[in-house]
Image (spheres, helix red, strand yellow):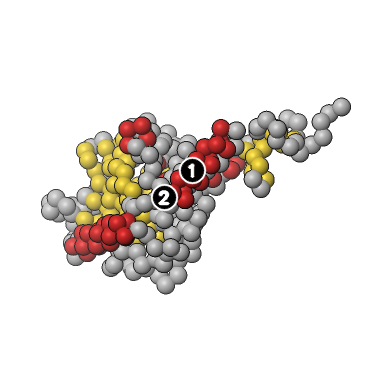
Amino acid sequence: MPMLSTRQHSKPLPLLSLLSALAIGCSFSAAVNAASDQTATYPDWSGQWERIGSLNWPPEGYDKAGPAPLTPEYQAIYEQNLALRADGILAGDPPATCLPPGMPRMMKMSFPMEIIITPGITYIYADWESQIRRVYTDGRDWPDYILPEFNGYSIGSWRDDNNDGSFDTLAIETRGIKGPRSIDSTGVVLHENNETVVFEEIHQVDANTLENRITTIDDAFTGPWTINQQYNHVTENIVWVEYVCAEGNRHIQLGNEWYFLNDELGILEPTREGQPALVPATP
């Protein structure tokens, strides 16, 4: 089962990025295929897993990890988003209007997740906007056509890296991811061509820690961007919270303008100085 993307780019990746992507895809594919004939048992990842680290894409934060590896074009878009945000406009953060975070941002887990493992599909349930990922581990190949979705289409395979008869690593590739999407809430957006490919390797570090090595290949970046996102295991007194974004969201975007819904008055209030109002001023 080939796990290297054969997507077509609207513009070619830089040579270094392309070579890195090929290396990642080939090593990923080799590792996945090596485990395809095993009859190992599956790990117990039941319970609740909550994010460790900041909500910035690098868990240690940009201060320690450094800035996003943006191309000049998308660095300019990022700086424009920062200027708009300084004026109170939530630019560069699609979930501000209740769009799903999509992949790979979904795996930041603002709210906890649950992982349900079956032989053919591993389900990743996120409380954040009730998002569900289906990772197909039944040996299928990529379909001729993938209907774009915010969470994309994921094919994975289990590995027994310790050679102890039990699977310990879930390797995943995700394609067909719909936009608009941002990598986090700081204004770093993914390329508008929506040709993102995401590789993940999920394994349990210890009894209380799950780690996801996430590599994102996107034309907004100068090359593959890898982070190690960890999650803490909760097994007792588990509380699942229903999060419906539209229930409490008051941000509305009309064209390039953002407004705040005032339920009490039934009007859209400006969010920045000098912004045109949508209702006449009361005499």
Q: Is residue 129 visible?
A: no
Q: Which residue is mark 1?
A: 78
Q: Viewer-proximal residue, 15 or 52?
A: 15
Query: Does residue 218 appear left or right of residue 156 in this picture?
Result: right
Question: What amino acid does circle 2 point to?
Answer: Thr
x and y, in percent, of residue 41 in the image? 21, 54
Query: Does residue 51 appear left or right of residue 148 in this picture?
Result: left
> Dot 2, how many residues are within 10 Å of its Cα: few (below 14), some (14-19), or many (20+)?
some
Q: Quadrant of the C terminus?
A: top right
Most distant residue in the top direction: 283
Q: Quadrant of the N terminus?
A: bottom left
Most distant residue in the bottom direction: 144
Query: Does residue 159 appear left or right of residue 116 in this picture?
Result: left
In terms of image quadrants, where is residue 218? Answer: bottom left
Cα separation, mark 2 vs mark 1, equals: 10 Å
Q: Is residue 268 visible?
A: yes
x and y, in percent, of residue 232 in the image? 31, 35
SS of the residue under disc 2: loop
What residue do we see at 53% from left, 42% from top? Answer: 80
> Dot 1, how many residues are within 10 Å of its Cα: few (below 14), some (14-19), or many (20+)?
many
Q: Which residue is mark 2?
A: 71
Most distant residue in the right direction: 283
Question: What amino acid does circle 1 point to?
Answer: Tyr
Q: Viewer-proximal residue, 138 or 257?
A: 257
Label pair 2/1, CB-CB below 8 angstroms? no
Any mark on residue 51, and which?
none
Query: Does residue 45 appear left or right of residue 114 in this picture?
Result: left
What residue do we see at 45% from left, 41% from top? Answer: 184
Please say if 141 is above or below 93. Answer: below
In terms of image quadrants, where is residue 94? Answer: top right
x and y, in percent, of residue 140 in the image? 33, 68
